[in-house]
Image: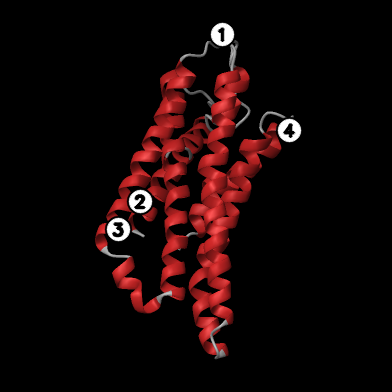
Amino acid sequence: LCNLSFSDVCFVSSTIPKMLVNIQTQSQVITYKGCITQMYFFLLFGALDDFLLTVMAYDRFVAICHPLHYTVIMNPRLCGLLLLVSWITSNLYSLLQSLMVLRLSFCTVLKIPHFFCEFSQILQLACSDTLLNNLVLYLSAVLLGGVPFAGIIYSYSKIVSCIRGIPSAQGKFKAFSTCVSHLSVVFLFYCTGLGVNLSSAAAHSSHAGALASVMYTVVTPMLNP
């Protein structure tokens, strides 16, 4: 929870302060270095949120389906290992994407139709070939989005099965209430995030993409208790 809170604060801080400054100064300008830096931290903490939400789904599964063995299974060593893997993988992912953008060449006049340096929008503005970047983008969307999301769905299918086996209605409500906030944030984060990434190449409405991005960059961290 501490790592998730820290990640959410940094995730929002990578985009919102700059957006507010742009609104206040009426100057929608960002430097090339600033854009790459913003993109790196946005991808880093976005991926970290992705992994932490998946880990939390597994935590809920163990707590509800194996309550007597919870402290044994979710021991401090395993929690630390899961956090370490999440941080390392997120850093490697964001570093890879940022370095691949550095190899691209851009035209002199650039206008990003977004409120931050969104990765897919930057690729569309490149003058050089972006085939490799797009392949990495869609592959990462499947691996870092689809696979964890499938793990969350599997965890919650097991949780629902366990809750159905609880005899008392009060027990069912208590078990389900511990998952509602996490489940709502998960669906809001994944549905909007994956939707923006997977439809970026075919979508022609940048305004709709920006609105969808607000859902997982601003609204989701705000709703996360």
Q: Position of residue 36 (x, y in %)?
A: 44, 24
Q: Residues within 10 Å of mark 1 (few under 14, many from 20)?
A: few
Whether residue 115 appears in this view of the structure is no
**How far separated are the C-alphas under marks 3 and 4?**
44 Å
User: Which quarter of the rendered picture does the N terminus lie within?
Assistant: bottom left
The residue mark sitting in front, 1 or 2, is 2
Q: Which residue is mark 4?
A: 205
Compute the Cα span from label 3 to label 2.
20 Å
Q: Label 4 is placed on what type of residue?
A: Ser
| Callout 3 amino acid | Leu
* Residue labelled with disc 1: 108
Q: Identify the element where label 4 is drawn.
A: loop
Residue 77 or 43: which is nearer the viewer? 77
- Height in image: 64 above or below 126? below
Badge 3 element: helix
Q: Quadrant of the C terminus?
A: bottom left
Real-space CA distance between mark 1 and mark 3, rounded to the nearest whole angstrom: 50 Å
How much space separates mark 1 and mark 4, taking CA atoms?
A: 23 Å
